[in-house]
Image (tube, grey):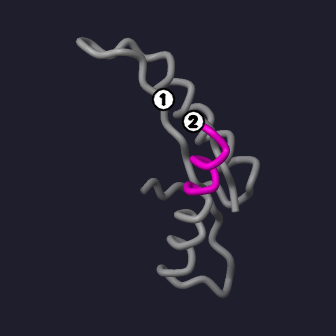
Amino acid sequence: MIICSHTNKEGIIALCEILRKRIENYDFENCSNQSVSFGASAFVKEDTIDTIISRADNALYKAKDEGKNRVKFL
């Protein structure tokens, strides 16, 4: 889990894309190239810890369902 100061969808997605691309392009020693998918969400006024984590988790499952190496925001 990454908690950041971005409060808008575009900023959150941009940060996740930067991290995703760095991991995709990183030369890991003794293993093949790696990829990562991110599920992302933004805090809204009515959120609890459980609701925001659940939304991000659902976004991650959606990203994985759509294929590897992607970012999904809910």
Judged from the image, the secondary structure of the residue bearing numbered disc 2 is loop
Give the residue at x 70% y 62%. Answer: 74
Question: Is residue 61 inside the magenta stretch?
Answer: yes
Mark linked to residue 68: 2
Q: Mark 2: which amino acid? A: Lys
Residue where numbered disc 1 is placed: 35
Q: Crowding near pointer 2: few (<14 within 10 Å), some, many (20+)?
A: few
Judged from the image, the secondary structure of the residue bearing numbered disc 1 is loop
Where residue 68 appears, as percent x and y from the top left, is 57, 35
Q: Which residues are magenta?
A: 60-67
Is the stretch drawn in magenta largely helix, strand or loop?
A: helix
Where residue 71 appears, as percent x and y from the top left, is 64, 44
Where residue 58 appears, as percent x and y from the top left, is 58, 65
Residue 10, placed above or below residue 50 = above
Give the residue at x 42% y 17%. Answer: 33
Q: Mark 1: which amino acid? A: Ser
Q: Quadrant of residue 15?
A: top right
Q: Quadrant of residue 18?
A: top right
Q: Crowding near pointer 1: few (<14 within 10 Å), some, many (20+)?
A: some
Query: Closer to the camera, 2 or 37?
Result: 37
Where residue 63 appears, as percent x and y from the top left, is 62, 48
In contact (CB < 8 Å): disc 2 and disc 1: yes
Question: Is residue 27 inside the magenta stretch?
Answer: no
- Relative to residue 73, is residue 2 drawn left or right? left
Distance from label 2 to label 1 (Cα)?
A: 7 Å
Residue most extreme to the left = 30
N-terminal-most mark, 2 or 1: 1
- Relative to residue 44, is residue 48 drawn left or right? left
